[in-house]
Image (cartoon, helix red, strand yellow):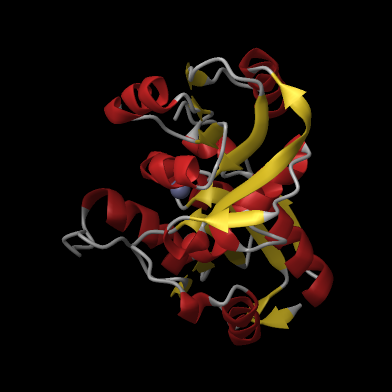
Amino acid sequence: MAATAEIERYLNEALSVSQFKDYGPNGLQVEGRAQVSRLVCGVTASLALIEAAVAQEADAILVHHGLFWRGQDGRLTGWMRRRLAPLFAHDINLFAYHLPLDAHPEWGNNAGLGGRLGWQADQRFGEQQLGFAAPLAEPQSLETLQQRLRAVLDRDVTVAPGDGRPLRRVAWCTGGAQGYFEAAIAAGADVFVTGEISEPQAHLARETGVAFVAAGHHATERYGVQLLGAHLAERFALDWQFIDLDNPA
Ligand SMILES: [Zn+2]
């Protein structure tokens, strides 16, 4: 068990929150009870996750995608009211860490995805150094990489092939980081793996020869909160669990 304020202080410091420019507030987004002994972790602060946390009698929820983002109109009505109401009714804290949790070298989404795939980053690239890159143990084909991703993430992946070169260096950034493709190319990658694809990436792949793989926004961002949740549980003697709510994205 630990004080909510102590957990927040620890997380903000450990994740170097003040060093990031982000699209929403990092840290304690909704304040609940003053002590935490049971923690539920999930990718997104959806109503389904909040209801699952209520059912688990959680004192706190830790997510990667919180409730508040730049550009929202700010009204606590409709779906936002329905997400907030159970948090207040049950006095549950909501902690959210977005870019700081993508970037952390040990507990971050990128570190976690790399760990599952055996990729040891020796380079960071892109805006706020969020991108990771690593040499592959031995050169492999795009098909081999695609199969491995399918197996590890347990979902299909979308591929925009490059020029068919053997893959020696992989770059990756979890979630909606398709905009980092050019930076990955500039960093010398043979393939870039992220969560989502938009229209321009297939053209860039054809024209630069660097392959592009979209392996799922949710699927690639499940690992950070699990690594961080496990760490917090050990540090503060919390009871914790990760709740994975399927998402086709
Ligand atoms: Zn995300």
- Give percent across and percent down for residue 236: 78, 76
Quarter holding the C terminus? top left
Pick the residue in front: 227 or 8.
227
Pick the residue in front: 10 or 82.
10
Q: In this view, does 209 lie to the left or right of 70?
A: right
- Give percent across and percent down for residue 160: 45, 19
Q: Is 132 located above or below residue 230 in the figure?
A: above
- Give percent across and percent down for residue 193: 54, 34
- Work out whether residue 109 can be spotted: yes
- Give percent across and percent down for residue 57: 64, 59
Residue at x 29% of width, y 55% of height: 80
Q: Is residue 30 left or right of residue 8?
A: left
Pick the residue in front: 46 or 90.
46
Q: Is 85 located above or below residue 215 in the figure?
A: below
Residue at x 52% of width, y 47% of height: 187
Quarter holding the N terminus? bottom right
Image quarter for residue 70? bottom left
Residue at x 53% of width, y 44% of height: 174
Image quarter for residue 222? top right
Q: In this view, does 185 lie to the left or right of 39?
A: left
Q: Is 216 located above or below residue 107 in the figure?
A: above
- Work out whether residue 245 can be spotted: no
